[in-house]
Every structure is written in structure tokens, then in C-alpha cells.
Amino acid sequence: MEWINVALPKGRLGEKVYRSFEAAGYACPGLLEDNRRLIFENEENGMRYFWVKPSDVAIYVEQGAADIGVAGKDILLEYRPDVYELADLGVGRCRMCVAAKKEFYDDRVRTLRVATKFARIARDYYASQSREIDIIHLNGSIELAPILGLSEVIVDIVETGRTLAENGLEVKEEIVPISARLIANKVGYKFKNERLRRLCRALEEQGKG
Ligand code: PRP
């Protein structure tokens, strides 16, 4: 049997997602125990999983190194990979937001400086508001930017809101809700269609339960 190659995002979300695969009947023994190995195979059900950096999942799937994978809607909006989005897995729920210091008020006169990892999402959002901005592209700890005067606002993911609260910031606007999506390579989806559709249905059933 040909492998179904699955790119899972390393970390907490990936573990949760794998548990859904397991519950849906697509287990792979050892996958959660050995934390150095990156590839796991189960010959009985033809599943081959690999752990990749969450922001790289879409690249593996787009290039066909993986048939399917799990990526956050944030990554799909930001990088727009040429893949099929098969299902909303209903996990990893959070929001893409504009946040700033509590006292911040946008006078809409000056160009707004926006610090973010998600330049495209930020640009699209402010373009839709006809608001002129400068993007300051950072790779992490975005919350520091408004505190240190590097930017007025940030565009970032908010899950519990703790990071903002502990740094004296608050949500000013909500851009879009985010959750984990099952994505598929376009060619792989055609050639392994029946198995992938069955897998997708089983995962969706899990999501309902
Ligand atoms: C994200 C985001 C915030 C934090 C929000 O960072 O950038 O910093 O989570 O979560 P909260 O609302 O529950 O506090 P992530 O942990 O993904 O790492 P990063 O710093 O590399 O972006």
C-alpha cells in the first residue's frame, strides 16, 4: 500500500491533532513517546507521519513532500500556499487581532506603525480600512514593540489574552478567527482521493464528538 504522508506541526497543537487522528483510527505507535525522532510509520494502516515546524507544514504539503498536513488558518492567510483546504479541525482556536497599549487611540492622521509576523494579513486588513501603515516585520515577542515605541500597534495571535494583559496591552480590533485546518497537496489528493476523503470524514466525525 502507498503511504499517506502527513506533516504534523511540532508542539502542543500537533499532539492534540495527532490524538484526533488516533481516535479516528489512524494511530501510529510511539509517535508521542519518542521526542527526537521526526518520522513514524505504521505499515498496517499505511500512515507515515513527520513532525515539522508549524509554519513549514504548508510548504511540505504544497511541494508534495506530504499528502496532507495540519496548518493554522493564520499561515494559510499569510502565505497563501497552493493547497486544498479540506476541513476545519476545530482545534487551536484563537484570533488574529490588532492590539495596542490601553491608552492608544488612532487619530488616523499619521502613518500607523504596525509590528507583526503577519505582514500580508496586516497589509490586507489596513488596506480594507483605507488606513496608511508602515509594517515593522518582527519574528517573535511582538508585544514588546508598542511598549518600546517601535510601533503603535501590533497584529498578532491572541489565544487566552494573557500575553497582552501581562504586558499592559489590550485587543483593539479583531481581524479574523483562526483554527487548525487539514490541508492537502493537489496532486496527492487526486491520486489518493478515496483514502484521503475517508480520512477527512473520520477526522470531521471526531471533531463533532
Ligand atoms: C503567540 C502570540 C502571542 C501568544 C498569545 O505566540 O504571538 O505572543 O501566542 O497567546 P495568549 O493570548 O494565550 O497569551 P506563540 O506562543 O505562538 O510564539 P511566538 O512568540 O513565537 O509567536
Image (cartoon, rainbow, N blue to C red):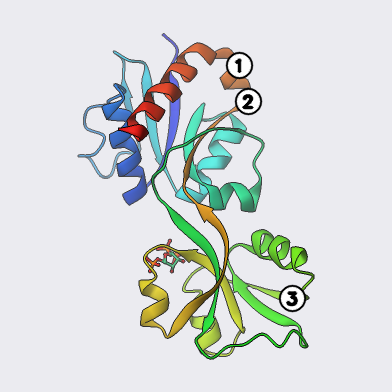
Q: Which residue is mark 3?
A: 133
Q: Residues within 10 Å of mark 2 (few under 14, many from 20)?
A: some
Between the residue at mark 1 and the residue at mark 2, the CA separation in whole angstroms equals 7 Å
The quadrant in which residue 86 appears is top right
Image depth: mark 2 or mark 3 in front = 3
Between the residue at mark 1 and the residue at mark 3, the CA separation in whole angstroms equals 42 Å
The disc labelled 3 sits on which kind of residue?
Answer: Ile
- Left or right for 88, reference 105: left
Badge number at residue 190: 1
Coordinates of residue 68 in the picture (x, y in percent):
49, 30
Q: Which residue is mark 2?
A: 186
- Nearest the viewer among 111 and 32 is 111
Image quarter where the N terminus lies is top left
Residues at badges 2 and 3 in contact (C-beta under 8 Å)? no
Q: Residues within 10 Å of mark 3 (few under 14, many from 20)?
A: some
The quadrant in which residue 16 appears is top left
Quick check: is the Cβ at mark 2 less than 8 Å away from ligand 1?
Answer: no
Quick check: is the Cβ at mark 3 less than 8 Å away from ligand 1?
Answer: no
Image depth: mark 1 or mark 3 in front = 3
Coordinates of residue 141 in the picture (x, y in percent):
46, 74
Q: Is residue 61 visible?
A: yes
Q: Residues within 10 Å of mark 1 (few under 14, many from 20)?
A: few
